[in-house]
Image: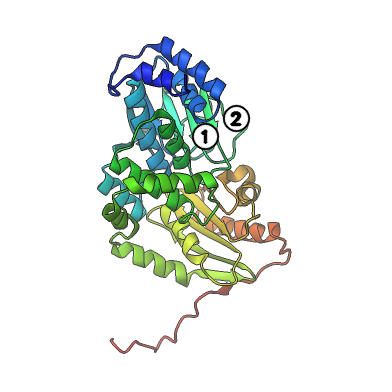
Amino acid sequence: MTAREPFARMWGKGLNSRTIDWSMVTEASESARAAGGRAARLAGLLEAARGVKSLNICAHSNPDPDSLASSAALKFLLEQLAGIKCRIVYDGVIGRAENQAMVKHLRLPIRPLRPIRHVRRPMNVALVDTQPRSGNNPYPRSYKPRIVIDHHPLLKSTEAAWVDVRPGYGATATILFEYLEASGLTPPARLATALAYGVSSETRDLGREASPEDVRAYLGLFPLVQKKILAQIEHPRLPRSYFTAIDRALHRAFSYRNVIGSKLGNVDSPDIVSEVADFLMAHERMTWCITIGCFQDQIYISLRSTNLKARAGRLIKKLLGKQGTAGGHGQMAGGQVDVSGMTPADVKLLEERILQRFLHILGHNESAEFRPLIVRPDPEFSPDFV
């Protein structure tokens, strides 16, 4: 008997069946574990879902394509195989134009989460692309979810009935692809498109921290992708506010040696902070980028690096310390600091301290004098078309 045969016997031809013989799950689990690999992980996931009738799948705050796609894939998987009613929830905003287009064109079934005061069913939540006590999801620090699936470094505090954290992967969407592959299910075209975009956006078209597994997942999904919709997602129509934000970011941008950055001030969405960091990192000769913006009493910081050994995730944790929460990977990271109750002057002072400490961690011990990236034109200058 192969590792997949027990699963096939359990589900039969009717993959939408709501009746599960859990003794078959145990048999499938034992056989899959003996075989090892992806089938074993699928068995473990299903065991963790035993007895669950409904499940909240929580993406990380201000979710990106990887988090959205991975959440949609987990919903599809558990509904098809275990008959669990799932809903995808998030907190924050979906601000980036590409992310909004993804939700719209792929009709992703997501909904904002109401503020949490009391967790009545603490075991009926799955955290996707995030972990407990990481600071980028809305659940209380004392909360223990049922499922955690993520590709960020494993936190010591992460506990759940099923934990699948693979920091060697470039995207959580790749992990969900492997679950689907092990199940024998073929994802619908919209889900395949979401997963493919999740992998490509998280790894910058497989060029940033992409593992062989990420490449294999993308190539496996691509034949199922709705190409025209993918193009609409990757090249969305942009609102006027986007160009205003980019103009402000460029005129507030600075450089110092191999470091480039921008202090954005108040922003309309946290997503613009990371978007500007990606944009500025294209500057030649620059190795590091830091961008800072303020949204709803939170300072958001994004780091990027071209150095393959940058350890940006570790750096930003050292940078913020106990002041805030942070996480990331080798070449990209993000964090936030609560500034509620602080005056605008205190916020600006804090931002300056963060910048100077960042340079100090990089080895620039002297007090830096930042150079503006763009020299403003003479006030009397006017373009020909004016």
Q: Residue 316, percent across and down?
A: 61, 50
Q: Residue at x 44, y 36 (%)?
A: 176
Q: Residue at x 59, y 40 (%)?
A: 153
Residue at the disc numbered 2: 157
Tell me if mark 2 has few (under 14), some (14-19) or many (20+) residues whose alpha carbon lies within 10 angstroms of its own: few
Q: Residue at x 55, y 58 (%)?
A: 304
Q: Residue 307, percent across and down?
A: 63, 59
Q: Residue at x 32, y 26 (%)?
A: 80
Foreground residue among 64 and 355: 64
Identify the image quadrant of residue 231.
bottom left
| Amino acid identity at mark 1 | Gln
Measure the alpha-carbon separation of dots 2 and 1. Answer: 9 Å
Mark 2–mark 1 CB contact (< 8 Å)? yes
For the residue labelled by badge 1, is the local secondary structure a helix, a strand or a loop? loop
Of the residues under marks 2 and 1, which one precedes in the sequence?
1
**Left or right, residue 142 beside residue 12:** right
Q: Is residue 94 above or below residue 149?
A: below
Q: Which mark is residue 193?
A: none
Residue at the disc numbered 1: 131
Residue 330 seen from this side: yes
